[in-house]
Image (cartoon, rainbow, N blue to C red):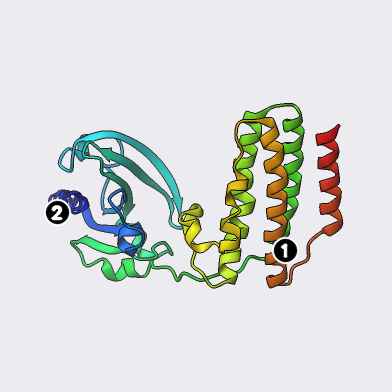
Amino acid sequence: MLNEMLACIIAWAESEARVRAVVLEGSLAKNEDVDDLSDLDVNIWFEGDLAFGRGTEWLADIGEVLIENPLDMMSPAGEIRTQLVIFKNGEKVDFSFWPVSLLEKPFPYYEKFEMLVDKDNYVAKISKCVTENKKVALAKSEFERIVNEFWFELHYVAKFLKRGEVWFVQGIQAGIRENYFLPLFEECARIEGVKTSFSGRKIEKWLPSVFVKRLPCLFAGYDVADGWQVMWEEIALFEEVSFFVARNRDFDLPIAKIEGMKALLKQIQEA
C-alpha cells in the first residue's frame, strides 16, 4: 500500500507545475524499522506561491482524506509549513513544503533521502543538505543540569503525592522520563557505541539490558501508594544511570545534595 500511495504522490507532483522536486525522508528513506504502519515523510519542493498545506482540495488527486492536521515546524532553514494527513485507506503521510529558493544556501537537515521527482536536477543541491550523524557526548554542564533538575522535580512529586494529586503527579513523572531519564539513557548507549532512536523509540534494542529490565519501575498506576513506590524505585534507577554516565565521562555527582534531597523526600512522605 505504501508503494501505491507513493505512486499517487509522484503522479500528482509530475502534473503540478509549481512542484519542482519531491523527496522522501524518514524511516523509509533510511530503510530502518519499516513496517505496514510506517508513515511516509514527503518533502514538496516548490516555486512560486505556496498553494498547498492547508485544506484538502489539493489532495484530491492523491487520495481521499480522513483527517488532516496543518502545522508549522522550525527547521535549520526557518519556519516550514507541514500538513499531516491520514487517508481513508489508512495511510499517513507527513507532507512538508520547501521553497526551492532555500537551496541557494544549503542547510543541515537530512540524514538520508530518496529523490522521487526531480524536474530541474536539484539532487546535487539537496545532497548538500545531508548532515553528518555524529555521536556527540553529553556535555558536563548538561549532565549537571539534568541531575540538578531531576532532584528538584522530585520535590514536586513528593509534595503532590502527599496531597493525593495523582493526576498531576503523573504529568510530572512523564516529564521526568522524557527530560531527564531519556537523555541519560541515550548517553549510556553512546558510551557503549550503540545507535539510538529518536524520542525513545526501540529503546529495548539500544539501552543496556541492565537498565531495560528496570524500565517498568518508571510507570505508576493511578494510586498514591504506587506513586510513592515508583518514586523510590526511580530514584534508585536514576542513581545507577547517573553514576554509570559520571564514571564513564569523568563527571562529578553532588553526593551531599542528593543525600539531602532523599532525606527531605522521606520526611515529606512520613510527615
Up the image or down, 158 lies above or below 185; here it is above
Tag count in the figure?
2
Q: Position of residue 160 (x, y in %)?
A: 73, 31
Q: CA distance from mark 2 to mark 1?
A: 56 Å
Report the residue at 20% width, 64% height from top: 120
Quarter holding the C terminus is top right
Circle 2 — which element?
A: helix
Disc 1 is placed on an element classified as helix
Q: Disc 1 residue type?
A: Phe
Q: Residue at x 51, y 54 (%)?
A: 200
**Residue sitting farthest toward the top:** 164
Horizontal side, residue 236 vs residue 110: left or right: right
Describe residue 223's horizontal placement relative to residue 264 as left or right.
left
Label 1 neighbour load within 10 Å: few <14, some 14-19, many 20+: some
Return the residue at label 1: 243
Image point 56% across, 66% down: which residue? 189
**Which residue shows up at 17% across the image and 37% down it?**
60
Q: Is residue 238 above or below residue 268?
A: below
Looking at the image, is mark 2 or mark 1 earlier in the sequence?
A: 2
Q: Nearer the viewer, mark 2 or mark 1?
A: 1
- Residue 79 image point, x, y percent: 43, 48
Question: Would you say 180 lies left or right of 49 here?
Answer: right
Local packing at callout 2 (Cα closer than 10 Å; few below 14, some 14-19, many 20+) is some
* Residue highlighted by disc 2: 14
Image height of 237 relative to 231, above or below: below
Is residue 27 toward the left or the right of residue 61 in the image? right
> Can I make out residue 136 in this image?
no
- Callout 2, which amino acid? Glu
The percent position of residue 9, horizontal first and vertical second, equals 19, 50
